[in-house]
Image (cartoon, grey):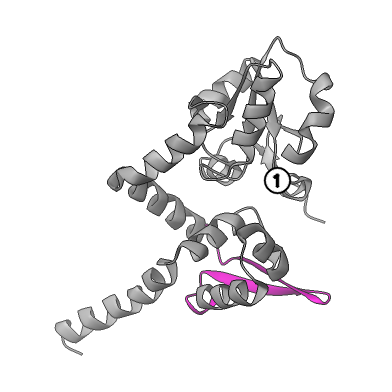
Amino acid sequence: MNKRDFKDKVYAELTRVTKALANPHRLEIIDLLAQGPFAVEVIAGYTGLSVANASQHLQTLKQANLVSMTRDGNFIRYRLAGENVFSAWSALRELGTACNAAVEKVVTDFRKGHGGLDAVDAMTLAKMLAKGQVILLDVRPEEEYDRGHIHRAISMPVAQLRKHLDALPKSKLIVAYCRGPFCVYADEAVALLKKKGYKATRLNEGFPDWALMGLPVEVPALS
């Protein structure tokens, strides 16, 4: 093989990955699977796709070795093929936000109507937690919290938040976090908390980003 053939072949193979990523639904699926494994029916529900369409997108990601599948009884669960898949998505998300101002505008416009634009970054939150300055709420579904969560976070899914408001102090800043920058659970939680008179903001990143940074987490012990 000469060097031209080598380059043509290696770049052509790499496009299998980039082509698999070049779809908004598949990017959202990767973002979701960063929380852990899900059955196709659950993925379809979270992404607003039909089960058939979700399955097709998952097969494309699987063929590119970006996701893998395991059988759990009668269910097939999909997961990211490795931590490097989320690392690549995180880098792509950062690059896209930096290079395309429209991404930031969409996020900004959405957050203006959901509790404001203020958000705290992961390193700042880590320092605030160490000093006991905040109450940290994980507003993802409980199943995702049980798979792993930020150290000292309290599980309070956004759908149940209204029922537990009386248990939260109004004297401290409350920080809500969810799946990541494009997840809206935290925005919904902050909007509700502020409406009820609490001091609240969201974590800009999500749990997978926090874990990727090597910040303190709690995960279930392996049996």
Please identify the quadrant where the N terminus is shown: bottom left
Q: Nearer the viewer, residue 50 or 26?
A: 50
Disc 1 marks a residue whose amino acid type is Gly
Q: Which residues are magenta?
A: 62-83
Q: Vertical placement of 177 versus 85: above or below?
A: above
Q: Describe residue 23's horizontal placement relative to residue 140 as left or right.
A: left
Q: Quadrant of residue 23?
A: bottom left
Q: Is residue 38 visible?
A: yes
The residue depicted at 68 percent of the width and 24 percent of the height is 193
Give coordinates of residue 102: x percent, y percent: 34, 45
Q: In the figure, is residue 21 to the left or right of 125?
A: left
Element carrying mark 1:
loop
Q: Quadrant of residue 33?
A: bottom right
Question: Dot 1 corresponds to which residue?
Answer: 148
Residue 29, position as x, y percentages in the image? 56, 62
Point out the residue furthest to the bottom here.
1
Does the magenta run of residues contain 161? no
Q: Looking at the picture, how far across and down is residue 168, in whole percent?
A: 78, 20
**Image quadrant containing the C terminus:** bottom right
In this view of the protein, can residue 135 be seen by the observer? no
